[in-house]
Image (cartoon, grey):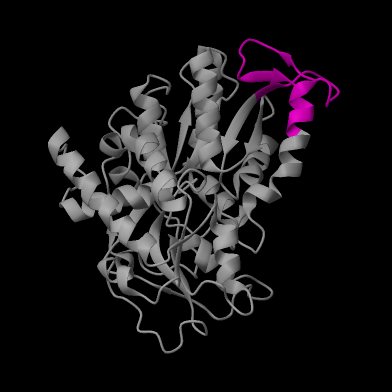
Amino acid sequence: MLGLNKSMNLTPKKTRRVSKTRFLSAVLGSTVAVSSLSVMSVSAATSHSVPTLLLYTAQGYGDKVAAAFNATNPGFKVVPYDDSTGPLLTKIEAEMAAGSPKWGVFWVDGATPFAALDQQGYLLHNIVAKGTAFNGAGMTNLPKDQSFAPTGVTVVGSLCYDSVATKGIKLPTTFAGLTSVPKGSLGMNNPTQSGPMYPLIAGIMAHMAGFTSKMTPSKAQLNAAVTKGEAYFMKLKNNGLQVHDTNGPTLGAMESNPATLDMAVIQSSACYGDINAQPKSAWPTGKVKYLDYSVAMPSNIGIDAKLSPALQADAKKFVAYVDSAKGQVAMQHGDPYGDGLFWPVIKGVNPEKYVPSYASTRAYAINPYVWGPLQNQINNWFVSNIIN
């Protein structure tokens, strides 16, 4: 989903993860490998040796879902390692290139990073349990080789705005209209840090070129689409586009009093989370508007192909749990005013009440196998030309 990268309050999630990551590093630093670098023995932290799968996750509910799964699956333990999507993907690629993977399961928003990992041979195929009751959204986002599995759907590119800060401003109705909003009033996130941002950038490029999710454009067509998209983002920059690392600081800029940012194109669940937070809204003047389209943002989960067969079977059990009715509800309850505000991918599970109809988002899907291999190239261009 998504990734990803998604704080639902004024503190960026990456910052909030520091203490958790340090704690996990301390635990893993005292462990002894069992049969794979992705599996550890946590005997230093428990009274007996427990096989452990390391879950790299950027989901706000990742730790809660892992805890719910572990409570009813005593044979092994899923241990979450929490960070933003960009750093996690970089970490996985570095581990795999070095031939010493420590991760076992990867769970973030977006399909493009998984497609890129799959094309490098890093992901286990056929990870979906037989009989998994995917609904239409689940089936649409499931790749043929089942090298990753959708776990929920959000959208990115929803226009989140502050109703006080934008008073008197005519809000745009299309992405094209974003280039002419008042100078300095529009923001977005850094695609190297925030998982949903690269799919948004790729989605804008694909939509401008008229690509569908089923198309495999030629190299010339793809280059033309990228060039056209780069020109669009240069227009946004020249009109004062503000770029923050993740949802936390982007939302914080809109929620500050007075606001230092009027509107932003980010992930829908981030906006709904702060607006509808209980017992008190974190952003009572916040609103969400959909333009001529948004970009579909499935959250996905994948497994390290280098795990032993026994460990692969364990990892598949966790995937099966996430893609069950019980697992979907655990995701919703694990981050009810943040990443839990997704459209489920399993039959019989309804989205939370704060989430509008999926049709209202005019979601547009991209082909992750077309855009995944371009992620580093486009992200590097964005940093060099838009941020710097």
In the image: residue 38, left or right of residue 46: left
In the image: residue 81, left or right of residue 358: right
Look at the picture and state if 211 lies above or below 130.
below
Query: How many labels, in total?
Result: 0
Q: Please provide percent x and percent y for residue 26.
A: 79, 29
**Can residue 160 be spotted in the picture?**
yes
Observer-nearest of 334 and 230: 230
Observer-nearest of 43 and 115: 115
Q: Please provide percent x and percent y for residue 59.
A: 56, 46
Q: Please provide percent x and percent y for residue 43.
A: 81, 20
Q: Would residue 28 be counted in the magenta stretch?
A: yes
Q: Would residue 222 be counted in the magenta stretch?
A: no
**Can residue 132 be spotted in the picture?**
no
- The residue segment tinted magenta is 24-52
Q: Which residue is rendered at x = 65% and y = 46% of the image?
A: 64
Among all residues in the image, which is located at the extreme top? 35
Q: Which residue is rendered at x = 49% and y = 70% of the image?
A: 354
Which quadrant holds residue 358?
bottom left
Q: Which residue is rendered at x = 40% and y = 31% of the image?
A: 128
Look at the picture and state if 124 lies above or below 178.
above
In the image: residue 204, left or right of residue 299: left
Q: Please provide percent x and percent y for residue 191.
A: 45, 47
Which quadrant holds residue 17?
top right
Q: Which residue is rendered at x = 26% and y = 41% of the image?
A: 367
Among all residues in the image, which is located at the extreme bottom? 168
